[in-house]
Image: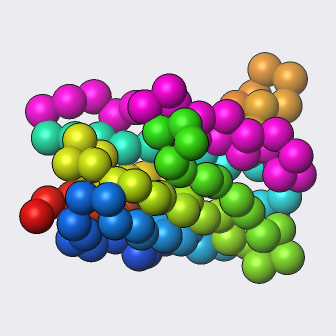
Amino acid sequence: QVQLVESGGGLVQPDGSLRLSCAASGFTFSDYGMSWYRQAPGKERVSVAFISRTGISTNYADSVKGRFTISRDNAENMVYLQMNSLKPEDTAVYYCKAAQVVGTNRSEYWGQGTQVTVSS
């Protein structure tokens, strides 16, 4: 079955760093664009970063540009989010998403999320 399993979250001080990982299985990973989303308490889930199937193209939310880096390893079916210079407002549950659009058919899978808390 399809699984996306995030890991690497935790408690970190402001200006610290964390690296999130997402392990994918049960589908052809290299056929899917991958994204990281986050959801803070009482707020909507929002996109943080996206990486194309080959890894050539990436884009980021304005709030994390220059601080976060998304990457993927298609040989290992992994996607990563390196988060530097963390701020308290980065506190949220972070989710990994896989998405593919073929014609009019869209496939989308989500992980269960990992908590990131930025606090002194």
Task: State the residue lying farthest toward the bottom.
Answer: 76
- Please tell me whether residue 49 is drawn above or below residue 1 in the rendered image: above
Q: Is residue 61 visible?
A: yes
Depth check, front residue: 47 or 102 = 47
> Looking at the picture, how far across and down is residue 35, in whole percent?
59, 45
Depth check, front residue: 97 or 83 = 83
> Looking at the picture, how far across and down is residue 60, in whole percent?
59, 35
Q: Is residue 73 magenta?
A: no
- Which colour scheme appears in the figure? rainbow
For residue 45, side relative to residue 83 (left or right): left
> Looking at the picture, how far across and down is residue 22, in whole percent?
55, 68
Depth check, front residue: 120 or 50 = 120
Q: Residue at x 77, y 31 (%)?
A: 101
Q: Residue at x 12, y 33 (%)?
A: 42
> Split into 4 quadrants, where in the image is the N terminus?
bottom right
Image quadrant of residue 13? bottom left
For residue 38, side relative to residue 109 (left or right): left
Q: Residue at x 73, y 40 (%)?
A: 58
- Please tell me whether residue 43 is drawn above or below residue 98 in the rendered image: above
Q: Is residue 45 magenta?
A: yes
Q: Is residue 117 visible?
A: no
Numbered disc total? 0
> Looking at the picture, how far across and down is residue 117, in whole percent?
21, 60
For residue 97, side relative to residue 74 (left or right): left
> Split into 4 quadrants, where in the image is the C terminus?
bottom left
The residues colored magenta run 42-63
Image quadrant of residue 66? top right
Task: State the residue lying farthest toward the top.
Answer: 104
